Image (cartoon, rainbow, N blue to C red):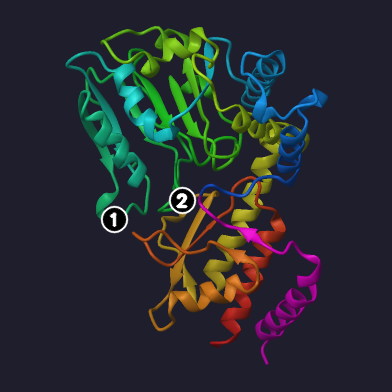
Amino acid sequence: MTRTEVLLKIQVVNFHKKLPFMKSVYNFSAGPSCLPEVAINGAKIAIENFQKNGISLLEMSHRSSPVVNLFAETTDNLKTLLNVPDNYHILWLQGGASTQFSMVPMNLIPENGSADYVDTGAWSAKAITECQSVGKVNIIGSSREAGYSYIPKDLVRTSGASYIHITSNNTIYGTQYKNYPALDNDDSFLVADMSSDILSGPLDVSKFGLIYAGAQKNMGPAGVTLVIIRSDLAEINYRNIPTMMRYSTHVLKDSMFNTPPVFAVCVVNETLKWLKSIGGLNGIKQINNKKAGKLYDEIERNTLFKSHVSEKDRSIMNVPFIFCDNKIADNEFLQFCDKRGLKTLKGHRSVGGFRASIYNAMPGSGVDALIAAMQEFESRYI
């Protein structure tokens, strides 16, 4: 028996020894994703008796002092974590990132104007489609022909385009921006859909005119969408659009033009407090890099699996991988993992294979358990 085989056997044995003491289920879903345990516990308390007011948060008026204070605290916590400049507004909206696909161009492209978009996957493609109903779209970069396996780098901006839109992390294809596109003039700005990697590490908000993110990856449950918008952009009024679709509407009313998703914001706040407690965004970046590094190392080492994503563009949030050949059915490994409490590892239907979404709240022990399962599964075939 070789040294590698001996080490593998030891790891498999240790995996089974640890099972009774490990968390029973690890949720690798791309979204809604796992949440920090402390955030879930905080949400439970809020449901039962919010801030010792004697009633559930679910019953409280959004005009009441406890809820108004909750929104203010959540905004302050986000500002602190991201170091958001004073000339930006933070909004807590509804409709998910999908509504922002339309809301962004409605507010930020003038009549007969255009915007530049980078096509890096399914979500950027949806954003492009929605923008086309408002103004002209210039696709200045695309990795579609390579199965979205990399982030396009050589971008040529369009003269007169209002902004450049990117999707910072691509959940389906497992690519992520490591460096954002640089702008060559002061008349345009960056817009980013950061739904799946917001708060995964430090971010220079000042490089963006607008950032939006659905909560159900790194922040909280589905139902609330974060928008960070530069003050001057929130005041633009290019066209007659519905009141609810204007950023200025929500700025003027502090995200309470209509009844907001109060409970979802509460869970976001609990998650933000957890992030602050573990060292903020510098702390979580180190944790995320360690988790992703270990998993990618195993994919490279394991004789059964491989990654199809360009190494320099690999996401630390979503890790897709496939079998090296088609001799083994995907379901065999999925069932193998499911029995070990490793859930929702099936890859997106457009890609196949497997996908481990290891957002902020995925503990290192979850990644370790997956790696051990991959090694044990490999031992069946070597």
Foreground: 54 or 275? Answer: 54
What segment carries the magenta color? 1-30
At a point 69% along the width and 84% down the height, the residue shown is 3
> Furthest residue to the bottom?
1
Please tell me whether mark 2 or mark 1 is closer to you in this view: 1
Q: Gap between marks 2 and 1, in whole Å?
A: 15 Å
Image position of 332 (left or right of 121): right
Q: Is residue 72 above or below residue 325?
A: above
Q: Is residue 154 visible?
A: no
**Which residue has dot 1 on it?**
146
Q: Which residue is mark 2?
A: 312
Quarter the C terminus occupies: bottom right
The amino acid beneath tag 2 is Lys
Viewer-closest of 187 and 22:
22
Q: Residues within 10 Å of mark 2 (few under 14, many from 20)?
A: few
Q: Position of residue 15 (x, y in %)?
A: 73, 74
Q: Position of residue 354 (x, y in %)?
A: 47, 65
* Element on which disc 1 rests: helix
Image quadrant assignment for residue 158: top left
Going 26% across and 25% down the picture, which residue do you hit? Answer: 115
